[in-house]
Image (spheres, grey):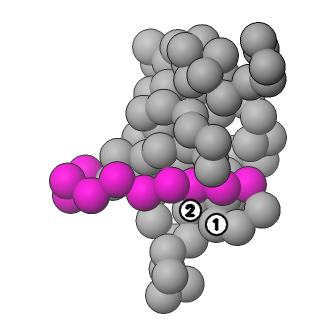
Amino acid sequence: MWEDELFDEIQKGDKVWYENEQGQTCKGKAVMIGPMGWVVDTGRGVPKVVNEGYNYLGHTKMPGRTPDHLGHFLNSDYGK
C-alpha cells in the first residue's frame, strides 16, 4: 500500500493511490500535473485525474521519479 505522504510531494513516475467513483481503492502511475491535479495512467488506456481534496489516498515513491517542472510552470501564475 501507500506510505503516508503529502500530495505536493508527488513526482512523475510515482505510484498514486486514489478512490474511484464506486469507492474502490485503485492505483496508477503519475504522468503529469495539470490545473485540476495529477494525471494518472491507470494501465487500461484511460487516464484519471487525482486531486488532493477529492480522491487522493496516498502515493509511493518509485525509482527513477522526476519532478514535473513543465507542469508546475504551465499551472503557475508566472507572467500573469
> What is the chief secondary structure element of the magenta stretch?
loop
Task: Name the kind of residue labelled 2 in the image.
Answer: Tyr
Residue matched to label 2: 18
> Between 33 and 26, which is closer to the camera in this rendering?
33
The residue located at (79%, 40%) in the rendering is: 6
Residue matched to label 1: 55
Task: Name the kind of residue labelled 1 in the image.
Answer: Asn
The residue located at (50%, 18%) in the rendering is: 65
Q: Are marks 2 and 1 in contact (CB under 8 Å)?
A: yes
The residue located at (47%, 44%) in the rendering is: 39
**In the orientation shown, which residue stands out farthest toward the bottom?**
22
* Neighbours of disc 2 within 10 Å: few (<14), some (14-19), many (20+): many
* Neighbours of disc 1 within 10 Å: few (<14), some (14-19), many (20+): some
x and y percentages locating residue 63 in the rendered image: 47, 18
> Between 59 and 68, which is closer to the camera in this rendering?
68
Relative vertical location of residue 75 with respect to residue 78 in this rendering, above or below = below
Relative vertical location of residue 68 with respect to residue 9 in this rendering, above or below = above
Q: Which residues are magenta?
A: 43-52
Query: Circle 2 sits in a helix, a strand or a loop, which is it?
Result: strand
The N terminus appears in which quarter of the rendering? bottom right
Q: Is residue 44 rendered to the left or right of residue 9?
A: left
* Separation of residues labelled 2 and 1 (CA atoms): 5 Å
